[in-house]
Amino acid sequence: MALNLTLLTTQAECDEVITDIDGELDAYQNDAFDDRRDDRRDGRTATKASNQLAILDNRIASYNATLALPNLDATTRRTTKSQLLTANYQKDRLTGRAGARTGAVAFLEEVDEEQVDGNVAVLTNAKALVVAHRAPLSA
């Protein structure tokens, strides 16, 4: 769809449009910054989850080794079984959370990125057209 530049009849109207477009472009730049920050945060979260999984795996192995010991008293056996159940539960929850980002979510994030790129291109083009249209207009 072609933009109807004849709607803008004065330089002041063009200036108003340019200011609004610049504001929208700034918003997209801020969103891109926020997305990069969120990506870094997600990376840290993934690393943290990976570290937590490793810790839980070590605990589970330790609890299993303890339970395999001969002559283990009843209190230690009961406590260790409880700790093993808790560690396995925590691991299941952590694994479930880590896998929560499905292919559909990742795809939709890519769609959002394409949409933003498209909007920035449209706004940049519109601004260039308005700047060119503004020059011959009266103040």
Image (cartoon, rainbow, N blue to C red):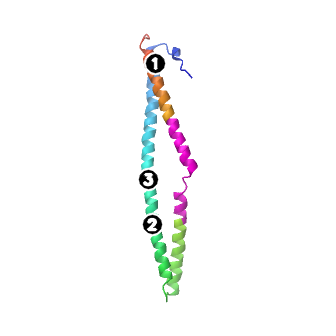
Q: Residue at x 54, y 63 (%)?
A: 93
Three-letter amino acid code at disc 1? Cys
Which percent across, then down, holds residue 89? 55, 68
Q: Where 3 sits versus 79, above or below?
A: above
Examine the residues drawn in magenta and state their main secondary structure. Answer: helix
Question: How many residues crowd mark 2 within 10 Å: few (<14), some (14–19), many (20+)?
Answer: few
Q: Tell me if residue 129 is in the magenta stretch.
A: no
Which of the two labelled residues, at mark 1 and mark 2, occupies the earlier sequence position?
Answer: 1
Q: Residue at x 53, y 78 (%)?
A: 81
Return the residue at label 1: 14
Question: How many residues crowd mark 3 within 10 Å: few (<14), some (14–19), many (20+)?
Answer: few
Q: Tell me if residue 107 is in the magenta stretch.
A: yes
Considering the numbered disc 1 on the image, is that residue within a helix, a strand or a loop? helix
Which of the two labelled residues, at mark 3 and mark 1, occupies the earlier sequence position?
Answer: 1
Which of the two labelled residues, at mark 2 and mark 3, occupies the earlier sequence position?
Answer: 3
- The residue segment tinted magenta is 92-116
Considering the numbered disc 2 on the image, is that residue within a helix, a strand or a loop? helix
Q: Where 91 sits versus 115, above or below?
A: below
Return the residue at label 3: 43
The residue lying toward the viewer, choosing from 36 and 20, is 36
Return the residue at label 2: 54
